[in-house]
Image (spheres, grey):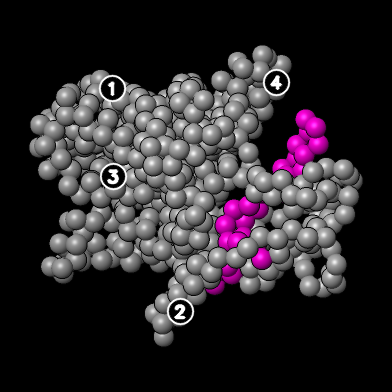
Amino acid sequence: MNRLLVICCFLFSVTSVLAKTTIEVAPVVHSDSLYKLVSFDSFDKLFYASETPDLKVTFGKYKDYEIWYDGKKTEFVSNTPIILKNIEIGDHSLTLKRKSKEIGKSFKVKSSPPIFKNDAVVFGLLMLILYFVFKTSSSKNSFLKKFYSFVPALLLCYFIPAAFNSAGIISSEESNLYFIASRYLLPASLVLLCLSIDFPAIKRLGPKAIIMFFAATVGIVLGGPVALWLVSLISPDVLNDSIWRGLSTVAGSWIGGGANQTAMKEIYEASDQLFSAMIVVDVFVANLFMSILLLGIGHNKKINRFFKANDTAIEALKLKMEKFQASVSRVATFNDLIYMLGITFCFVGLSHFLADNIGPAIKEMLSTMDVSTARLLVSFGSKFFWLVVFATIFGVMLSFTKYRKFEGVGASKMGSLFLYILVATIGMKMDIMELIANWGVFKFLVSIGLIWIFIHALFLFVVAKIIRAPFFYVAVGSQANVGGAASAPIVAGAFSPALAPVGVLLAVLGYAVGTFGAIICTIMMQALSV
């Protein structure tokens, strides 16, 4: 019965998103009871077609503005309310323009509400998924053993929540779980994974980690203009004055993170509608590539043989960590766990306190600087950037104290658990049905994104082959750019929890160089378009 319910929900989601509709903007002529009333000032972020098929928008104090919908000018002005009828599923924008002034609102329309909205229920479902994955991955069943030899458990921890989100069972838009996981569990995991870090052993890994990180960066910088040029051979229309602006935000995201992405939007003035489309392309392509990397971890040894790579330093670090864990390992008492989590979340709180004060202070300082310089340094005004930095610093500091022995009562295991919960919440953000619903809009953008990430991967593999770098450096170097602090330690930890700090350190480097690399990439895309 439950299986039938899931299938029915999935089919309903598919049929509803495939039912394309037309967009009409018209003056108010009917009863308000037929529409959902929305004030432009308090515009909601999410609507469901099954509940609110049409929207009545009032503009209040905004008079004599031109109304633009999805980046296109309409025949209406903001002196009277309007009705948005038969809105298509997906991301949309409503913008008011008058001379040099522009006020934009973005919103999303989904077919119907998810089955489960309560975050407690959704969290329970995600934990049940993790239980199912690890229960089956440790099974002695011959089929399951063979299956998990090809498909890593971590990949399923990502894709099953993505499938549930795509089928309308849960919804990332309705949930705050990703925010909680990324703001509380991620910094806690950074502290726990870094407190047992062995810097001399990491140093013996050599310069290949840094080389592969910058190889990944160069692959993204060059991949953007090359991908845009290749797609333009089929569709010359992509070489216009707006596409390259939108792609600049993807470059910012893939080299740095969200703050860099927003900086590129401001620098190159990408429209709200295009920015929304680029976010979907960014999430879909980046998460697809992350799943490929996770799949590759299951074939790590074969790939290393292809690269003729020597991973003895990596294996030595893993073995040294295992020996250290064995030497300090003991049965954890209640007091041990209280001490460990007390210290950990104390530093998480301190990281938040410092980030909440330093981030806005630097942002205020940047506002007094030259605009072009300020935009280059915008990442340093991000609270999340400083949260990751301080959590990492505090974890490293603990590694030089007696608290390093918390590893003996399961510090890295607890940190890995937090990361797996984060993986599940990241999976919730992927919606295949939304991509299908907006395929007419996204097909060329997705094509550019897929070619772009392919060039990035190709560049990585060529450099890895030349310098004989292990696949670990390929995967972590890539995710330190494309995925940032949320994904790099996940991929590194999939090899071994002892290696997660390498991903963290490289991800912080990505934040620092993100905007600079993205600007170089955008200049080339702009030159190509002009």
Q: From what the image shows, is residue 170 above or below residue 472?
A: below
Viewer-side residue, 480 vs 439: 439
Q: Upstream in the sequence, badge 3 or badge 4?
A: 3
Query: Given the image, on which type of amino acid does mark 4 rest?
Result: Ser
Q: Is residue 114 magenta?
A: yes
Q: Is residue 332 magenta?
A: no
Query: Given the image, on which type of amino acid does mark 3 rest?
Result: Leu
Inspect this view and state whether residue 190 appears. no
Query: Given the image, on which type of amino acid does mark 2 rest?
Result: Cys
Q: Which mark is residue 293?
A: 3
Spatial distance from mark 3 to mark 1, Cα to Cα? Answer: 18 Å
Q: Which residues are magenta?
A: 86-115
Q: Which mark is residue 211?
A: 1
Q: Position of residue 153 (x, y in %)?
A: 28, 56
Say whether marks 3 and 4 touch (CB < 8 Å). Answer: no
Q: Position of residue 430 (x, y in %)?
A: 45, 55
Quarter of the image that includes the N terminus: bottom left
Q: Which residue is mark 2?
A: 8
Spatial distance from mark 2 to mark 1, Cα to Cα? Answer: 49 Å
Q: Main secondary structure of the magenta part?
A: strand
Q: Report which quarter residue 477 is drawn in.
A: top left
Q: From what the image shows, is residue 403 above or below residue 72?
A: above
Mark 1, secondary structure of its residue? helix
Residue found at x 48% / y 22%: 527
The mark closer to the camera, 4 or 2, is 2
Residue found at x 74% / y 49%: 74
